[in-house]
Image: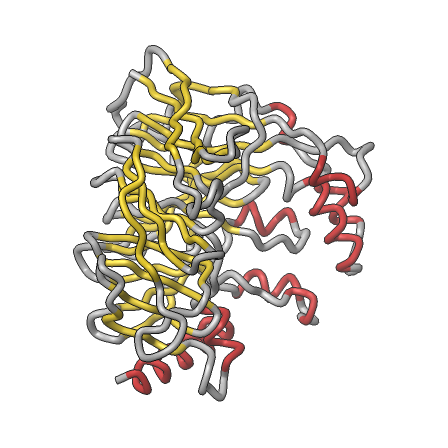
Amino acid sequence: MQTKILIILGVFLIALFGCNSKSESTKKPIDGEPIANISSVVRDTLSIKLKPELSQYYNTTAFDSKSSLYYGYNEVKHAIDIFNFESEAYVRSIQLEIEGPNSVQPFNEITVVNDTIFLIGYFYFTVMDADGNIKRKIPINSNSDKPYYLNHFLYPDKDNGLIYQRETGKFFIKNANMQVSKQKDVKGFFRSFKVLGEYDLKNDEAKILDIGFPEAYLEKDFGFNEIVFADSDNKNIYLVYSGLPELQVYNIASGETTNYELSTEGLEDVNMDYKKISDAGADMTDISNLLNAYIFNSNYGPIFVNNTIIARVYQGAVPESVPVYEANKHPKKSAVQLFDKGSLQLLKNIDLGFTITFSGIYLQGNTMYFQTLSENEDELQFIRLTWD
């Protein structure tokens, strides 16, 4: 069975990198009816007391909004620590084995659905139950004659690499590694590139989704490849791209893709000098330096979706006067935009006032959580926004 899965994934990725058809994408007016309203926003802090063996900050995390359970990978203990946001308490830990048939190698991606835990590392895609018992262990790199394709299909990308659709048992996976610097025809490469793959865990089937970069993104012509997407609402997959104020919506049933403009109100400093990036020509080093300074640190996304709200997290621009090597240390404006899901109207623009990373952010109903580092070493801490 594992051999079958490995072959399917290998063929899938070869096709994913070689597919030349272009996904049609049209921009439509926003004509939906409003379904949400926000009158006020309250900010407070969620703090959970820690035992000595627990971590104060987790880099690889998951959150189950139905159970209010937060899962953090404790790299030192090689364990998954579980906390309850509702009771604001530590629950338990799942100790992972290092050797033997139930061994789990270090991983960079974790998703939890209905007490089933999915882990993606550099060598295995692991499925385990809530007690840590391994149900399936699929090799994605080791013992493969095409490790490059497999490794870049199930690519470990913290918090943004994996969408699981509960009803169908399908995963939607970002094609994250593009190897742009190795391409002779960069423009052609970007126009033929497909950004999402689908893997049916139940039937061991994989396919390429005919969805590429939005036309407005391709017109920028600067060779940037980062894509950030939100969780699916089981009907659509929502995608945004750094530096582009558009929402790309992929309908799972029909396979159609539609782009929508989203408001940039209150985010005036998001504009970047695309001409300067384009004028850098084919020198990938120059382009990379510009991107590091002006896009990696100024982007739209990620986005989070529930039944009524689309929340888009924003991180501000780095001034042009700041050297590239200091860009990551420079203070940046951060904000959250709350959109009505039905009409895509901007409901609220919230200035966060603190530095964020794009991992450890969760949307649960009318509440958002942002993982932050507490001044107290015995606390796991989150900034909490609640609206009504």
Viewport quadrant of the C terminus: top left
Asked if 102 appears above or below 244 in the picture, the reply is below
Nearer to us in this view, 265 or 157? 157
Using the rendered image of the protein, determine whether residue 152 is visible from the camera's viewpoint.
yes
Location of residue 21 in the rendering, given as x and y in whole percent from the top left corner: 46, 67
Residue ID at (51%, 41%): 358
Q: Is residue 178 left or right of residue 85?
A: right
Viewport quadrant of the N terminus: bottom left
Location of residue 270 in the rendering, given as x and y in whole percent from the top left corner: 62, 30
Location of residue 297 in the rendering, given as x and y in whole percent from the top left corner: 64, 39
Residue ID at (48%, 70%): 122
Using the rendered image of the protein, determine whether residue 195 is visible from the camera's viewpoint.
no
- Count the marks: 0
Asked if 169 appears above or below 276 in the picture, the reply is below
Nearer to us in this view, 103 or 203? 103
Residue ID at (44%, 57%): 77
Q: Quadrant of residue 379?
A: top left
- Looking at the image, the residue that sits furthest to the top is 39
Residue ID at (46%, 78%): 141
Q: In this view, does 292 lie to the left or right of 110?
A: right
Q: Which colour scheme is used?
A: secondary structure
Nearer to us in this view, 67 or 258? 67
- Looking at the image, the residue that sits furthest to the front is 52
Location of residue 253 in the rendering, given as x and y in whole percent from the top left corner: 23, 55
Q: In this view, does 177 lie to the left or right of 293?
A: left
- Looking at the image, the residue that sits furthest to the left is 167
